[in-house]
Amino acid sequence: MVAANLKAETMKLVENRSAIEVEMNAIIERLCQPGGPGLSGNLVDAEGFPRTDIDIPVVRAERNRLAVLRSDHKEITEKINANIQVLHSARLAARPLTTKGSGNDGASNNQNSSMVNAVASASSHSVVTRDSPSSMDVDMILSIPFAVVDEIADASPTAEDGLQLGDQIVKFGSVEYKVGDNLLQRLATEAQANQGHAMPVILLRQGAPVNLTVTPRSWQGRGLLGCSFRIL
């Protein structure tokens, strides 16, 4: 129940942050339009007189409003990231230990993937951007990564398709974490079954959700992927 409430709270915070971003982007667009004062441009002309080509009280009000929104955005983003870290840690802690027979080394190898740090401030000529999760990403972040990419060959299919060392696999085609599965065998079978066909891969990269498509295929090296996985 506590986890459900925390997730609902996080979803609401994400919605609130999205509304703030819409307002921030609108203000930034107005201030930075051609001939506009920008986010910090002078409100006086070269001779020190108030500019007559802009509405100075409106510009000041919008700049003040933007400062307030930035502060609110930062506070909400920090709360979102804290909530997601708690929920993600709880899911990992609840995952049962796998055995050597399943292809693991017998240890619960929970890697401390750092959660996303917010990039919330806007530049003087761009809209708001961020690396923290959207509402669509929350469920994916709470999913359990079951394997990590620990080797990738140069010019291999996975290297060309964008997989990177350290990527934590949440879903590989149709393969997801399931208690008792031989996940290494399932990964190999999934690659063989999809030879020549693009398949979706969902992963966490330094805590951030990433969606890719990978096409298992023949190449100059061994296998259809050119990478190896270590089961977590």
Image (cartoon, rainbow, N blue to C red):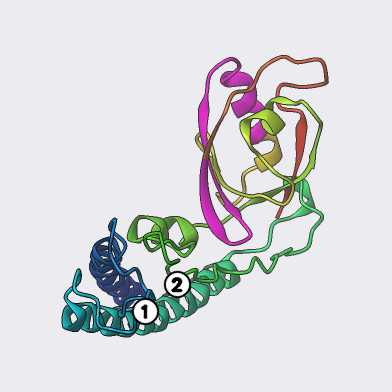
Name which of mark 1 and mark 2 comes first in the sequence.
1
* Residue drawn at the location 49% of the way across and 68% of the way down: 119
Q: Secondary structure at mark 2?
A: loop
Q: Secondary structure at mark 1?
A: helix
Look at the image and give the residue range highlighted in magenta. Answer: 186-211
Q: Is residue 192 magenta?
A: yes
Residue 8 placement (x, y as % from top left): 29, 73
The percent coordinates of residue 186 (x first, y second) are 63, 34
Residue at 82 percent across and 55 percent down: it is 105
- The residue positioned 46% from the left and 80% from the top of the image is 78
Tag 2 residue? 121
The answer to whether residue 214 is above or below residue 211 is: above
Residues tagged 1 and 2 counted as in contact (Cβ below 8 A): yes
Residue 65 at x, y = what percent?
25, 82
Is 155 placed above or below 185 here? above
Q: At x 17% / y 79%, what residue is drawn?
A: 58
Pointer 1: what residue?
70
Q: How many marks?
A: 2
Q: Quadrant of residue 126?
A: bottom left
Against 157, residue 165 (above or below) is: below
Q: Crowding near pointer 1: few (<14 within 10 Å), some, many (20+)? A: some
Residue 210 lies within the magenta run:
yes
Q: Quadrant of the N terminus?
A: bottom left
Q: Residue 21 in the image: x percent, y percent?
A: 30, 67
62 vs 38, left or right, is left
- Dot 2 amino acid type: Ser
Residue in the foreground of this view, choosing between 44 and 22:
44
Q: Quadrant of residue 54?
A: bottom left
In this view, the residue farthest toward the front is 47
